[in-house]
Image: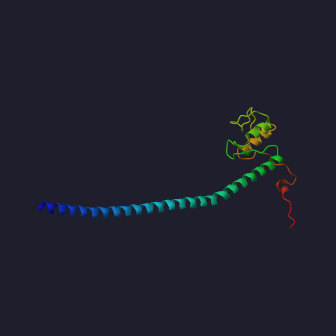
Amino acid sequence: GELATLVNLVDQATKSIDKTVDLAAENANKRVHVLLGISIAKMGMGVLWVISTAYAFGRLWVPYVFNYNDLKEADQGLKSMIRAAFDLVLSVSPKAPFEPLEGRRELDHFLGHIGDYDNIVSGSDSGGLLALARGIDERERLLAFLKGGVAAQKPPATARGSRACCKPAWW
C-alpha cells in the first residue's frame, strides 16, 4: 500500500526532475553553441581587421618608403655634385654655437687634423671652422658671420657717391 504509493510518487518526482534537468542541459548546450558562434564570429572579425589594417598600412607605407629612398638618393646625388664642385661641404647649425650638423670628419680631414669634435667652431688646435680663415681680418669676418651677421666693412669709395651702384634702366 502506502510504501508502494510512496515509491510511485518518488519515481514520478525523479522523472519530473529528470525532464527539468534534460531541459536545462539542452538550454545550456544551446547557450554554449551560441557563445561558440559568437567567439568564432569575433575571431573572424579580428582576422578581417588584421588583414584590412595590414593592407591599409601597406598601401600607406610602401609609397612612403619609395619616396624616402628617392629623397635619400636625390640628397646623395646633390651632395656628390656639391662635393665635386667644392673642396668641403659642411652643414652648420644656424644657432650658436654653430655646431656642424654633419661633416665633422670631412672638416678634420680637410684641415689635416685628428679632430676635436667638441670644439669644432672655436678654432682650437684641432682646427675648427675659424681655422679656415686666412688672417685675423678674415677670422673676424667669419666669426661675425657665424654669430649671425656680417662683419662691419667700409663700403668702397666711389666718385659719384652712394648712387654709383644704381644704373639707369633701359626703359
Viewer-closest of 165 and 150? 150
Pinpoint residue 154: horizontal percent, then vertical percent.
80, 46
Residue 55 occupies quadrant: bottom right
Give the residue displayed 83% in from the left and 47% down from the top.
84
Pinpoint residue 100: horizontal percent, then vertical percent.
71, 42
Furthest-bottom residue in this view: 171
Furthest-top residue in this view: 125
Q: Is residue 124 visible?
A: yes
Image vertical order of residue 20 relative to residue 97, above or below: below
Viewer-closest of 31 and 104? 31
Furthest-left residue in this view: 1
Give the residue displayed 21% in from the left and 62% down from the top.
11
Q: How many marks are shown on the rendered structure?
A: 0
Pinpoint residue 45: horizontal percent, then vertical percent.
51, 62
Give the residue displayed 31% in from the left and 63% down from the top.
22
Q: Is residue 12 left or right of residue 73?
A: left
Give the residue displayed 75% in from the left and 33% down from the top.
114
Image quarter where the N terminus lies is bottom left
Image quarter where the C terminus lies is bottom right
Residue 103 occupies quadrant: top right
Viewer-closest of 96 and 52? 52
Asked which colour scheme the image uses, the reply is: rainbow
